[in-house]
Amino acid sequence: MTAMDAELLAGFTGFIPVGELHTRMLESVPLDGGVYLVVLPSGVPRPAFLAVSSGGHFKGKDPSVSAQKLAHEWVDETRVLYVGSGACLRTRIAELICFAFGVPIGHWGGRLLWQLAERDAFLVAWKVIPDGKAKEVETEILEAFRVGHAERLPFANLKR
C-alpha cells in the first residue's frame, strides 16, 4: 500500500469483501450517512478486465465498456478503486452490491468495478460523516486522490 493509500484509508472501518456483503454482512454497515470506498486487497494483483460486466442492466442499459476504456481508466500504484457517499451507508452499499450481482437498480456510479475479475474479494470500507456532509467529504477525498495521482480519479469514478 502506498503512503497516499494509507492517508486516504485513515479513519475507514469495515473492509468487508464484496462476496461477504452479498451473502450475509450488510447488517454490519451503519445506517448513518457517510463515505465508502472499494479497495483492492493487499496481495491481490491487478485484476483482469472482463469482456462483460456482471452489473445490472439498469433501464435496459448494458454497463459493459471496452477493454480500451477499462485500461484507460485504470490507475496504477493505488488500491483505491472507487469512492462513493450516501445519506444511509447501508442502503447505498446494498445498492452497490446488488448492482454488482446483476440487479438492475440505479447504482450506475462505480459500474467499471463489475467488469474486473476478483470482484468478490474487493473490500468495502466506510466512514460515518455527521451533519449531512458526506458528499462534501467525498469531494475532498476525490480531490486528494486526484492531486496525489497526476490528476486521475480512482478507476471506477468517472466524474468529479
Image (cartoon, rainbow, N blue to C red):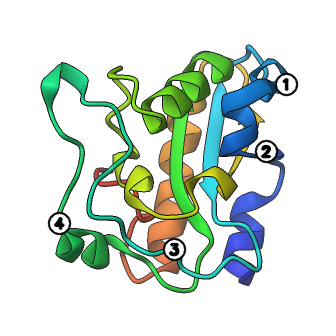
From the image, tell me which residue sits under label 1: 28
Q: Position of residue 130 (x, y in %)?
A: 73, 22
Question: Distance of mark 1 from mark 2, alpha carbons?
Answer: 9 Å
Residue plotted at (42% across, 50% down) = 114
For the residues labelled 4 and 1, say whether their Cβ atoms are less than 8 Å apart.
no
**Dot placed on the residue nearer the N-terminal end, 3 or 2:** 2
Q: Position of residue 122 (x, y in %)?
A: 65, 56
Amino acid bearing label 1? Ser
Q: How many numbered marks appear?
A: 4
For the residues labelled 4 and 2, say whether their Cβ atoms are less than 8 Å apart.
no
Question: Distance of mark 1 from mark 3, alpha carbons?
Answer: 27 Å
Helix or strand or loop: what does disc 4 sit on?
loop
Question: Distance of mark 3 from mark 2, alpha carbons?
Answer: 18 Å
Helix or strand or loop: what does disc 3 sit on?
loop
Amino acid bearing label 3? Pro
**Dot placed on the residue nearer the N-terminal end, 1 or 3:** 1
Q: Position of residue 20 (x, y in %)?
A: 76, 38
For the residues labelled 3 and 4, say whether their Cβ atoms are less than 8 Å apart.
no
**Dot placed on the residue nearer the N-terminal end, 4 or 1:** 1
Question: Distance of mark 4 from mark 1, alpha carbons?
Answer: 35 Å
From the image, tell me which residue sits under label 2: 16
Amino acid bearing label 4? Ser
From the image, tell me which residue sits under label 4: 66
155 relative position to 5: left or right: left
